[in-house]
């Protein structure tokens, strides 16, 4: 019991209740995941995946998927799901090892539920345009054959999955499919009409589902559709602009690729505030934005640009559009994901959660118990703000902690299975 009391006095972030150690929620942007499709004209230039440390900027390639393009990267609970042409792969983002991989021709976009991964499909698939998989194993759970045509972006809100159904390239309408997540069952599909042609990215604002309808080739106007899920009612809002990918909704602000730049729309009054918050990267020279994510914690944008055959680059911008730096992205980096961790919101018993360490408190060396035999593992130590202070790939049963500042730390041992053992220890 003395360990509990000592932890509580060492950190104001921590409280004690029912024998468990609790802390206030702390979100930390750990790393950026970049998926690059390579040179479209080179059949031997495959999809590569890299991780860029958010704090140090260090970046490395951790895998190759032997296919030609990438559609989406989804980061969820320290895992990265990658949709790449005909493949679906999930990675452990602590060890960068594959957890599972399956063939998925026509894979498009993804969204994560509590236990299931929902995936949309497009050509060459001709049916089953929304499917549900188990997150860890990627075992198929459900196929929603009621979805009528090729599907795209998805949104989960109020225990309902909403899926954009743009159809194929000759489609003359846009639809939204609705799925009940409690029963994992299809609800209905709503036809939004011709003004929703190109429907793709979905966002929630004030319990209204907004769809970014990408402007068809050769057209010069764009539209957003506001869909009321309770009454199945919708309103279209037109703009004198060309819309591409949606980027993010932050409060009443919708960031969207617009006229080859990244612009800003006010969702309260349905007006374009800034057509080029982040300027066109050089479309006159065939260089385009292909992916963008908004880091809401640090109020920054991560974007990638490419000409699809010889050049690719990552560019970081402030919330006001000021360029802050560059990062490696490879050719055709069409998908990126932000690995944001909530490390201190979990509850941990002080002495053990499947992991034994001693002595605790420790001054110089910490010994790891509970292992039947020595084997290679990845060990992480994080402070109570969720910041990683030490990482080792080792088979040793003891680690030198003499260089750490006094205080409480979380230690996590991962053995590459996607399941880690962790506990809290005190550094004297």
Image: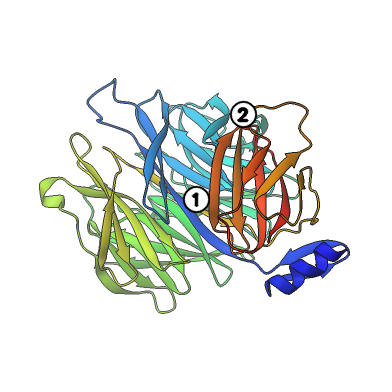
Above or below: residue 153 compared with residue 407: above
Residue 206 appears in the picture as rendered: yes
Farthest residue, direction left? 285
Q: Nearer the viewer, residue 59 or 65?
A: 59
Give the class, few, some or many, for how many residues have Cα within 10 Å of label 2's Cα (few <14, many ≥20). few
Q: Earlier in the sequence, mark 1 or mark 2?
A: 1
The Cα–Cα distance between marks 1 and 2, rounded to whole angstroms, is 50 Å
Give the class, few, some or many, for how many residues have Cα within 10 Å of label 1's Cα (few <14, many ≥20). many
- The residue indicated by pointer 2 is 376
Which residue lies at the image location 29% right of the left edge and 66% below the top edge?
Answer: 263
Q: Is residue 367 left or right of residue 61?
A: right
- The residue indicated by pointer 1 is 175
Q: Nearer the viewer, residue 396 or 39?
A: 396
Task: Count the labels in the image.
Answer: 2
Residue 143 appears in the picture as rendered: no
Residue 143 % position (x, y):
64, 34
Asked which secondary structure carries label 2, the reply is: loop
Q: Nearer the viewer, residue 387 or 151?
A: 387
The N terminus: image quadrant: bottom right
Asked which secondary structure carries label 1, the reply is: strand
Farthest residue, direction bottom? 269
Above or below: residue 225 compared with residue 253: above
In which image quadrant can residue 343 be found? bottom right
In which image quadrant can residue 15 be found? bottom right
Q: Which mark is residue 357?
A: none
In which image quadrant can residue 389 be found? bottom right
């Amino acid at each position: 019991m003395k360990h509990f009391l000592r932890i509580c006095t060492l950190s104001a972030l921590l409280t004690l209740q029912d024998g468990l150690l609790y802390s206030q929620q702390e979100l930390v942007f750990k790393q950026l995941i970049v998926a690059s499709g390579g040179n479209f004209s080179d059949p031997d230039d495959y999809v590569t995946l890299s991780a860029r440390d958010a704090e140090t900027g260090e970046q490395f390639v951790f895998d190759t998927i032997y296919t030609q393009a990438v559609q989406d990267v989804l980061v969820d609970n320290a895992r990265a799901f990658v949709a790449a042409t005909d493949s679906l792969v999930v990675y452990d983002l602590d060890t960068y090892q594959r957890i599972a991989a399956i063939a998925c021709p026509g894979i498009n976009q993804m969204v994560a539920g509590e236990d299931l991964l929902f995936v949309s499909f497009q050509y060459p698939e001709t049916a089953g345009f929304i499917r549900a998989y188990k997150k860890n194993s990627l075992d198929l759970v459900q196929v929603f054959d009621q979805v009528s045509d090729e599907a795209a972006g998805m949104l989960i809100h109020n225990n309902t999955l909403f899926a954009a159904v743009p159809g194929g390239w000759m489609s003359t309408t846009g639809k939204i499919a609705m799925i009940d997540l409690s029963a994992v069952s299809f609800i209905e599909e709503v036809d939004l009409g011709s003004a929703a042609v190109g429907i793709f990215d979905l966002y929630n604002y004030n319990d209204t589902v907004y769809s970014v309808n990408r402007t068809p080739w050769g057209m010069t106007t764009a539209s957003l559709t506001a869909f009321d899920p309770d009454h199945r009612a919708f309103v279209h809002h037109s703009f004198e602009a060309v819309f591409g990918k949606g980027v993010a909704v932050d409060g009443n602000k919708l960031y969207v690729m617009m006229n080859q730049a990244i612009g800003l729309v006010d969702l309260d009054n349905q007006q374009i505030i800034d057509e080029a918050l982040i300027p066109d990267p050089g479309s006159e020279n065939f260089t385009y934005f292909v992916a963008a994510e908004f880091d809401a914690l640090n109020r920054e944008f991560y974007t990638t640009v490419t000409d699809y055959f010889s050049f690719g680059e990552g560019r970081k911008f402030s919330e006001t559009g000021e360029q802050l730096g560059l990062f490696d992205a490879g050719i055709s980096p069409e998908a990126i994901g932000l690995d944001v961790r909530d490390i201190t919101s979990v509850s941990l018993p002080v002495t053990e959660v499947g992991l034994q360490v001693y002595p605790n408190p420790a001054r110089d060396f910490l010994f790891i118990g509970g292992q039947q035999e020595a084997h290679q593992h990845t060990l992480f130590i994080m402070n109570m703000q969720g910041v990683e202070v030490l990482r080792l790939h080792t088979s040793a049963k003891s680690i030198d902690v003499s260089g750490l500042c006094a205080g409480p730390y979380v230690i996590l041992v991962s053995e590459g299975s996607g399941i880690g053992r962790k506990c809290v220890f005190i550094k004297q």
